[in-house]
Image (cartoon, rainbow, N blue to C red):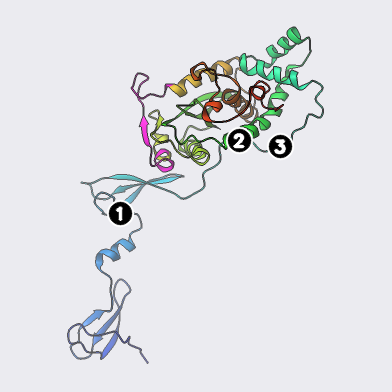
Amino acid sequence: MTIIPSNAVCPRCFSKDLYRFGKDNEGFQKYQCKHCRRQFVLDKPPRNSRNKKRRKYPDCPICGKVTFLHHDYTYYSNFRCGDKKCNHSFRVPKLINVEPPSSELNPQSFSFKGMRHSLHIVLCALNYYFCGNSTTRKVSQILYMVHQIKVSHVTISKWIKRFAPVFKKIATDRLLGIKLCDSDEWHFDETYIKISGKDYYLWLAIDSETRLVLDFHLSPNRDSSAAHTLLSSCKRKFGQPQSAVISDRYYAYQQPASLFFPEARHIRVEDFNDLINNNVIEAFNGQFKAWYKPKRGFNSFESANRLIATYIFFYNFVRPHLSLNGLTPAQVGGAKYSEKERFFWLLVA
C-alpha cells in the first residue's frame, strides 16, 4: 500500500486524495491530485539554494556566479569566475599539514665521552670557526699557534656537527619565554648555497626590531612549498607581527603570507631604495655569505643543515651587535642569560 505523507496537500484544490507520480529530474518525489490532476512536488527548496548545493566549486566572491578550477597546487587551489565580464581569480587554502622546516634537527643524546680535549679548547675552536669566518684547516692552525695543541681539521668538523643539536635545544628553551608578536615587521628572503656541487636554497626569516633570526629552512627547491614551510613554522613558534610581513616580489610568498598572517599587511618591495625595504635580511645574507664563501660549499645536506643551525645560534645568542648597543638579538628579544653563559656558549651555565 502506498503511503502518502500527512502534510501532502494539493496546492490548487487543497485535496489530500493524491497519487505518487514518480520523481522529477532532480530526484524529488512528485504527487498528482485525483480531483484536479495537478502535479506538484512537496517541500521542494528554492532554485537558488538548490544550485548552490549542487555546485562543485565555491561561488565567485565578487558576483556569486559559478567558478572553475584554474590551477590546483599542493597547499591551495586557484579558482576563476566563469563570467567573462567578471573573470575574478581567487585562492582557497587546503586544510593539510605543512612539512616541518629543516631547522627541526633530530634529537640526539650527547655526552663528552671519547673527547680527548677539554671543553675550553672545543669552544675556542667553535668561536674561531664562526667568529673569524675561518675554515676547519685554518682553525686547526690557529689552535696550534695560539694554544700549542694539535687537532685535525676533521676532528674540528666533527665537534661542530656534534654540538649542533645541543645548541638547537638551548635556543629552543631560551626562545620559549620571549614575545615577538609585538614587533612591527618580519622579513623573509632566500639565498642559495652549494651542496655537493648542486644549488640549494636557504629560506630565512628575521625580526626587524631585535634582528633575531626567527627560523630557517634548507630546501633543494625554490617554490611555494618551501615558503609555506618557513612561514608556517614562524607562525607556530612566534605568532604574527603587528604591522607587516615584508618580502621581495617572488610570487611564492603571496599565498602563505595571506594564509598564516591574515591580520598583517604583506609588503612586496621592489627596490633597495624604497621607504619600506628588505635591507635588514639582506644585511644578514651578506654576513652569512662572508662566513660561507671560504668553505666553498658543503659536502652533504645533513652537514650543511647542522652548520647553518649552529651559525644562526651563534648569531642570535653569542655575538654582540653594534646596532643593538652591544647586546645579542636574543637579549634584545627578552631572553635572559648571563655574560658567563654567553662567553661559554651556554654550556657551562
User: Closer to the observer: label 3 or label 1?
Assistant: 3
Q: How many marks overall?
A: 3
Q: Which one is in front in this view, the residue at disc 2 or the one at disc 3? A: 2
- Give the CA separation, mark 2 to mark 3: 15 Å
Q: Nearer the viewer, mark 1 or mark 2?
A: 2
Residue 284 screen position, x and y as percent: 50, 21
The answer to whether residue 232 is above or below residue 11 is above
Mark 2 highlights which residue? 172
Q: Quadrant of residue 292?
A: top right
Left or right: where 216 falls relative to 255: right
Tag 1 residue: 59
Where does the magenta region start and end?
Answer: 257-279
Numbered label attached to residue 108: 3
Q: Amino acid at mark 1?
A: Asp
Spatial separation of the CA atoms under disc 1 and disc 2: 44 Å
Question: In the rendered structure, are the residues bearing label 3 and label 1 in contact, judged by CB atoms less than 8 Å apart?
Answer: no
Q: Residue at x 62, y 18 (%)?
A: 130
First reached walking from the N terminus: tag 3 or tag 1: 1
Looking at the rendering, which quadrant does residue 154 occupy? top right
